[in-house]
Image (cartoon, grey):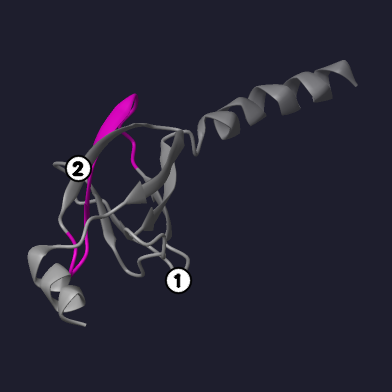
Amino acid sequence: MRIVIFMLALFSFPLFGMGQNVVTGKIIDELGLPIYLAAVEINETNEVAYTDFDGNFSIENEKNFHWKINISSQGYKTESFFVLSGGSAGEIVLQYDEELRKLLERQ
């Protein structure tokens, strides 16, 4: 019985390492509204994730430690942030770009 438990524990260690290089977060605008389909890209890679209806994203990469992520969406200024892998970026607020700001000020 001890051998079976030891073997199960031994083979489960790789599972604990999986998913540690994931960053999650939420993208909102200046009013606190979620931004749908904002692109979240890890700098200098081809890894891209898009936010859901609630502005949430989850992106994974084999790179360990910290990443620089670039966030872009039409109507907003592109932002870059440093985040730690295996953590949460929290809520990230995107600022309106000049065209959208002018449009909003007219009304």
**Where's the C terminus, which quadrant?**
bottom left
Q: How many neighbours does mark 2 have within 10 angstroms: few (below 14), some (14-19), or many (20 or more)? A: some
Q: Amino acid at mark 1?
A: Phe
Q: Position of residue 41 (x, y in %)?
A: 24, 50
Residue at x 64%, y 28% (from the top left corner)? 11
Does 63 lie within the magenta span? yes
Q: Disc 2 and disc 1: Cα gap in Å?
A: 21 Å
Which residue, as the protein is rendered here, is positioned at the far bottom?
Answer: 107
Task: Look at mark 1 in the image and give the residue it sits on.
Answer: 53
Q: Is residue 97 above or below residue 85?
A: below
Q: Is residue 21 above or below residue 103?
A: above
Q: Is residue 30 above or below residue 24?
A: below
Does 102 lie within the magenta span? no
First to last magenta residue range:
61-76
Mark number displayed over residue 10: none
| 73 sits to left or right of 1 | left
Q: Secondary structure at mark 1?
A: loop
In terms of sequence position, does the residue under pointer 2 or pointer 1 come before the other? 1
Q: Secondary structure at mark 2?
A: strand
In the picture, residue 73 is in which quadrant? bottom left
In the picture, residue 51 is in which quadrant? bottom left
In the picture, residue 48 is in which quadrant? bottom left
Residue at x 11%, y 72% (from the top left corner)? 102
Q: Amino acid at mark 2?
A: Ser
Task: Look at mark 2 in the image and give the residue it sits on.
Answer: 80
Q: Position of residue 105 (x, y in %)?
A: 17, 74
Residue at x 51%, y 36% (from the top left corner)? 18
- In the image, 71 versus 15, the foreground residue is 71
- In the image, 85 versus 61, the foreground residue is 85
